[in-house]
Image: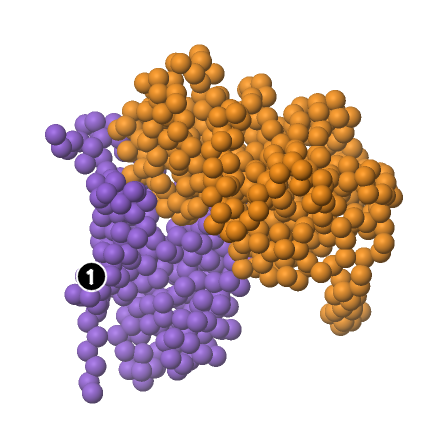
Chain colours: A purple, B orange
């Protein structure tokens, strides 16, 4: 007999895991929206942010100060990336910019380990990961906290894009870089601001993922979880990142439990990519992505 | 002046590069180290290679080398990647006086087997590697010292049986093996099946895809299966995530038993309170209270030559594994020198030393390693050497030994190992050594 309660438990667990994927995906979306670049260094930025934060904490810096200092470091990193990597590559093809972010990811990973060492660190944010029972389904408090943080982040970005001058500039650049330049928007400043925003997202994702995995090199590998989310939700939609994350989280967990046994298990990593690939074939711009229309 | 600093650094780098090309002196024995100090597994690499180098330094500083033969080494960074490991092998293999290779990587070790066999230099895969390389009749140059994956499996099942009150009490119990989705993780699938058949316990084996940073579905399946015990056969980030997810689904942590690559501080510290009570197998105890550790602290770190940047890691699991690995390598050289002379040995002569590496508890105590590890008894056809295992429990701050030294069921395992090694020999057209051949093959 089909165990509905177990099904719901797997589904809920998958949805909550998906929220964590969305946190990573949002960082990608921010940069893609404004510059058309798939920032492969987002994972390295998450590692760098988490490692900086936990290293400061371990050196006796109080939590709020460590958080502020990490945010400041990520702002400086964002500005430096724009100044020394992106600005010299203006007007280069997207593949060149993508390769630059690929190289950047190795540089950031190496710098993080050089600066803070290669040790594995525990990170306790003071939020319990013990489950509580809701009608027979165990739900983790930490997962709910992560979902609330992701929700708050999306709400903040929505307000920022709609009601601030910088946010409007982001949207203008996202719509048409050349038109934005023509009306006097300073592209380098917008790019620096957007990399800074991606850095702030990296701090949030780094802290939450770091508390879950420990702060270690593997944090940079979580970008692999974000890629199918982006394909499904669309590379330029924050709402898409959230919905895509939820869908991918749920699909991979259900696939592992109900389909995995027919293939010997261990399918969840590639099941997400199978879905993403299928989606790419029928809807290349994703669920919420902007359809690209080019005049020829 | 600051502007000359880059030139000074360049001059030092050039001197090191030139020195590395020069041949070793006649009274030196060289260890090429395929280390990994950056990348995803750097924590394990810095600990293990740090411990190994600390012990070699101790022998050089305290004893002036092994019978006057100074120990030297050079490191090549692999980041735990196979192709880099092979590149380091090709770069360092022609250095004079190569004693043995110690990559601490299943992938790199696999890629080196044919090469080291051709070059006649021992390959040491302490606690890991191919199980069937235990059979020295087929793998004369490979030494999975102390513990191969099958012995580890048997040791873990024996430990669970002890906790349940004897092997007969395992009947009807359910054991889930949660394994890393890699050749390393899958290596023990058949032996768990055989042991389940033999002892009558129910078995389920669940794969976690690499790297293992999400395990919600696997642990929900474990809870649904009503497992009595979970054996964690993990690696890297998979281990703390397993412990945290077990807590999330309400599985008792003291019923999770970790394998030898799930037993370090790096596996439990990131899991925080979720790891408190977790038990794992080991071949060497952790802690710095052993005389050999105290000597290293006094002599090596006292002289400012310690290899670990963070002195708090002295006596950690990987550091102590590196020290034990150092003891075994040095003693193999010492044993070989007793036969071939107090001089730089060839790789084949060092192999002979490993094939006669017999350290009983009294000798282990004399080396300052009593209770650090038990003993080893390597022979020409048994390259593992009947290592004993013990179990340690994490109390939130440190590991505490919670069992005696346990023997795996070697008599049960040997025919299975020989079946596999014989098949390998047939496949690769290898002549199986006999006891008559053994002394001649030196």
Q: Residue at x 66, y 27 (%)?
A: B375
Disc 1: host chain: A
Residue furthest bottom in the image: A296
Q: Name the residue rendered at 60%, 29% in the picture.
A: B387
Whole-percent x, y for residue A253 in the image: 26, 43
Q: Nearer the viewer, residue B205 or B116?
A: B116
Q: Is residue B21 in sight in this rendering? A: yes
Tell me, yes or no, if residue B291 can be seen here.
Answer: no
Asked if residue B352 is positioned above or below residue B290 in the image, the reply reads below
Q: Which residue is mark 1?
A: A279
Q: How many marks?
A: 1
Dot 1 alpha-carbon crowd within 10 angstroms: few under 14, some 14 to 19, many 20 or more: some
Give residue B415's position: percent from left, percent from top. 49, 31
For the C terminus of chain B, the image quarter is top right
- Rendered residue at 39%/60% (across/down): A198
Q: Is residue B299 left or right of residue A268?
A: right
Left or right, A137 with reference to B112: left
Which image quadrant for residue A129? top left
Q: Nearer the viewer, residue B121 or A164?
A: B121
Q: Residue furthest front?
A: B436
- Residue at 39%, 23% (x, y): give it: B198
Could you say which is closer to the camera, residue A237 or residue B270? B270
The quarter of the picture where residue A145 lies is top left
Residue A137 lies in quadrant: top left
């Amino acid at each position: 007999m089909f165990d509905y309660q177990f099904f719901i438990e797997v589904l809920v667990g998958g949805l909550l895991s998906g929220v964590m994927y969305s946190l990573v995906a949002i960082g990608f979306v921010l940069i893609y929206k404004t510059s058309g670049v798939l920032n492969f260094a987002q994972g390295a930025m998450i590692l760098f942010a988490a490692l900086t934060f936990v290293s400061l904490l371990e050196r006796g810096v109080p939590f709020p100060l460590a958080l502020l200092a990490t945010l400041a470091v990520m702002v400086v990193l964002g500005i430096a990336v724009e100044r020394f990597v992106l600005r010299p590559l203006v007007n280069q093809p997207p593949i060149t910019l993508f390769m630059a972010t690929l190289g950047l990811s190795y540089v950031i990973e190496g710098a993080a380990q050089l600066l803070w060492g290669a040790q594995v660190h525990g990170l306790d944010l003071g939020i319990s990961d013990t489950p509580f029972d809701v009608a027979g389904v165990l739900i983790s408090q930490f997962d709910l906290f992560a979902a609330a943080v992701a929700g708050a982040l999306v709400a903040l970005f929505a307000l920022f894009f709609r009601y601030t001058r910088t946010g409007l500039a982001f949207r203008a650049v996202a719509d048409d870089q050349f038109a934005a330049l023509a009306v006097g928007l300073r592209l380098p400043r917008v790019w620096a601001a957007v990399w800074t925003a991606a850095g702030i997202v990296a701090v949030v994702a780094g802290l939450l993922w770091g508390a879950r995995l420990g702060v270690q090199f593997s944090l940079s590998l979580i970008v692999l979880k974000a890629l199918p989310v982006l394909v499904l939700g669309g590379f330029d939609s924050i709402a898409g990142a959230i919905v895509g994350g939820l869908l991918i989280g749920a699909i991979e967990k259900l696939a592992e439990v109900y389909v995995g046994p027919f293939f010997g298990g261990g399918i969840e990593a590639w099941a997400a990519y199978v879905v993403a690939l299928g989606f790419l074939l029928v809807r290349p711009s994703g669920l919420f992505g902007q359809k690209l229309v080019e005049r020829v | 002046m600051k502007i000359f600093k880059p030139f000074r650094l360049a001059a030092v780098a050039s001197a090191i590069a030139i020195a590395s090309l020069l041949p070793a002196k006649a009274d030196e024995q060289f260890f090429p180290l395929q280390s990994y100090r950056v990348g995803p597994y750097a924590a394990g690499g810095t600990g293990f290679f740090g411990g190994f180098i600390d012990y070699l330094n101790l022998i050089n500083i305290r004893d002036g080398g092994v019978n006057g033969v100074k120990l030297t080494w050079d490191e090549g960074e692999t980041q735990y990647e196979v192709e880099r490991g092979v590149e380091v092998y090709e770069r360092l293999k022609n250095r004079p006086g190569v004693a043995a290779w110690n990559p601490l990587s299943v992938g790199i070790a696999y890629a080196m087997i044919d090469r080291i066999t051709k070059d006649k230099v021992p390959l040491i895969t302490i606690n890991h590697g191919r199980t069937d390389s235990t059979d020295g009749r087929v793998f004369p140059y490979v030494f999975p010292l102390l513990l191969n994956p099958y012995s580890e499996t048997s040791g873990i099942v024996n430990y669970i049986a002890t906790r349940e009150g004897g092997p007969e009490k395992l009947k009807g119990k359910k054991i889930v093996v949660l394994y890393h989705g890699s050749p390393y993780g899958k290596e023990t699938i058949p032996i768990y099946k055989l042991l389940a058949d033999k002892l009558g316990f129910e078995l389920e084996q669940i794969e976690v895809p690499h790297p293992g940073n999400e395990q919600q579905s696997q642990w929900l399946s474990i809870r649904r299966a009503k497992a009595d015990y979970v054996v964690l056969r993990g690696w890297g980030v998979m281990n703390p995530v397993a412990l945290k997810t077990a807590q999330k689904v309400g599985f008792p942590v003291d019923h999770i038993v970790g394998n030898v690559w799930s037993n370090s501080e790096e596996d439990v510290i990131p899991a925080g309170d979720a790891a408190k009570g977790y038990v794992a197998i080991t071949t060497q105890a952790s802690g710095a209270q052993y005389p050999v550790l105290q000597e290293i602290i006094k002599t090596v770190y006292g002289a400012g030559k310690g290899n670990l940047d963070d002195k708090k890691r002295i006596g950690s699991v990987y550091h102590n594994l590196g020290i034990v690995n150092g003891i075994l390598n040095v003693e193999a050289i010492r044993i070989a020198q007793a036969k071939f002379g107090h001089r730089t040995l060839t790789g084949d002569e060092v192999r002979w030393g490993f094939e006669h590496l017999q350290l009983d508890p009294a000798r282990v105590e004399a080396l300052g390693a009593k209770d650090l590890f038990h003993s080893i008894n390597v022979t020409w056809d048994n390259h593992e050497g009947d290592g004993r295992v013990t179990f340690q429990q994490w109390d939130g701050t440190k590991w505490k030994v919670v069992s005696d030294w346990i023997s795996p069921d070697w008599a049960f395992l040997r025919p299975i190992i020989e079946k596999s090694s014989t098949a390998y020999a047939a496949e690769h057209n290898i002549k199986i050594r006999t006891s008559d051949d053994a002394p001649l093959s030196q």
